[in-house]
Image (cartoon, coloured by chain):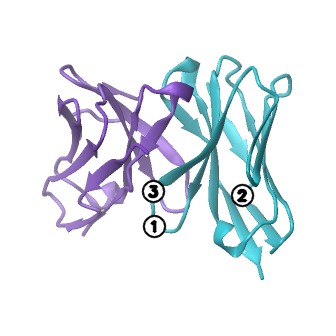
Chain colours: A cyan, B purple
């Protein structure tokens, strides 16, 4: 079945870059997403990438997609303390709106 | 941007009672909405797809008689947790696709259910 894996924890210093990695299994996924969740809150869509793209940049965020290896990454440049949160990658199931989420990576930004 | 709201944001109930959670799309119509469940410090698990005007589609392992879903209008889906038990305590989140470019969907802020 479909599965999405992420590392559980990442700690970086303020001002450094953060790279959060994700692997997925459904090669038919049309879109792959990155969501941010702050404590006790819902999900905020950060960015998404269409499966025929290799890279997408949006201000401080850069998404890289290696479709051959089914590997997705999110790079946050100049990480700030406000970026501390849980980051989920998600793939669309068989190109539908249903999403399979990874376990989430908890990003801690140290001052 | 598109907004999805949920009500209530937090609810505490006694074991055996039923609880209704509402999910509304505020500035767009959604023929489909999704209900997810999130356990503490865990990922989101898709529970069911709510379809306007027809029956919901449940994921494997989700009890349809336990989690009743009604999608009565193009802007409202409700999830009713019937005869709630402590193990039903969780964070319930809904989402709605906007149907716009990018196949994006927006998530509600979530409802924290605690069953005593």
Task: Identify the element where label 2 is drawn.
Answer: loop
* Residue B90 against residue B49 in the figure, above or below: below
Q: Picture quarter containing residue B114? A: bottom left
| A74 to the left or right of A100 | right
**Residue at the (76%, 55%) spot, across then down:** A60
* Residue A107 against residue A76 in the figure, above or below: below
Mark 2 and 3 residues: CB-CB less than 8 Å, in contact? Answer: no
* Residue A77 against residue A51 in the figure, above or below: below
Q: Which residue is mark 2?
A: A8
Q: Mark 2 to mark 3: distance in Å?
A: 19 Å
Q: Which residue is mark 1?
A: A40
Eye-nearest disc, 1 or 2: 1
Marking on residue A86? none
Marking on residue A42? 3
**Which residue is farthest bottom?**
A111
Q: Chain of mark 2?
A: A
Determine crowd level at label 1: few under 14, some 14-19, many 20+ residues with C-alpha closer than 10 A.
few
Percent across and percent down for residue A50 are 68, 26
Percent across and percent down for residue B17 are 13, 57
**Residue at the (45%, 63%) spot, across then down:** A41
Examine the rendering and report whether any part of residue A84 can be seen: no
Q: Chain of mark 3?
A: A
Mark 1 and 2 residues: CB-CB less than 8 Å, in contact? Answer: no
Q: Picture quarter containing residue A30? A: top right
**Residue at the (64%, 22%) spot, across then down:** A29
């Amino acid at each position: 079945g479909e599965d999405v894996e992420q590392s559980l924890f990442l700690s970086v210093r303020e001002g450094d870059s953060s790279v959060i990695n994700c692997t997925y299994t459904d090669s038919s996924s049309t879109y792959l997403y990155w969501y941010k969740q702050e404590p006790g809150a819902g999900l905020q869509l950060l960015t998404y990438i269409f499966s025929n793209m290799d890279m997408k940049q949006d201000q401080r965020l850069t998404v890289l997609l290696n479709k051959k290896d089914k590997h997705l990454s999110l790079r946050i440049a100049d990480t700030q303390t406000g970026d501390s949160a849980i980051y989920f990658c998600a793939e669309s199931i068989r190109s539908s709106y249903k999403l399979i989420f990874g376990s989430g990576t908890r990003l801690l930004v140290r001052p | 941007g598109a907004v999805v709201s949920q009500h209530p944001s937090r609810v505490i109930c006694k074991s055996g009672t039923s609880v209704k959670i509402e999910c509304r799309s505020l500035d767009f119509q959604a023929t489909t909405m999704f209900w997810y469940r999130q356990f503490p410090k865990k990922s989101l698990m898709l529970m069911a797809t709510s379809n306007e005007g027809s029956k919901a589609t449940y994921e494997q392992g989700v009890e349809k008689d336990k989690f009743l879903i009604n999608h009565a209008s193009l802007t409202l889906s409700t999830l009713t947790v019937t005869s709630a038990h402590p193990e039903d305590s969780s964070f319930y989140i809904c989402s709605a696709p906007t149907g716009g470019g990018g196949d994006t969907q927006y998530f509600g802020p979530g409802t924290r259910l605690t069953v005593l």
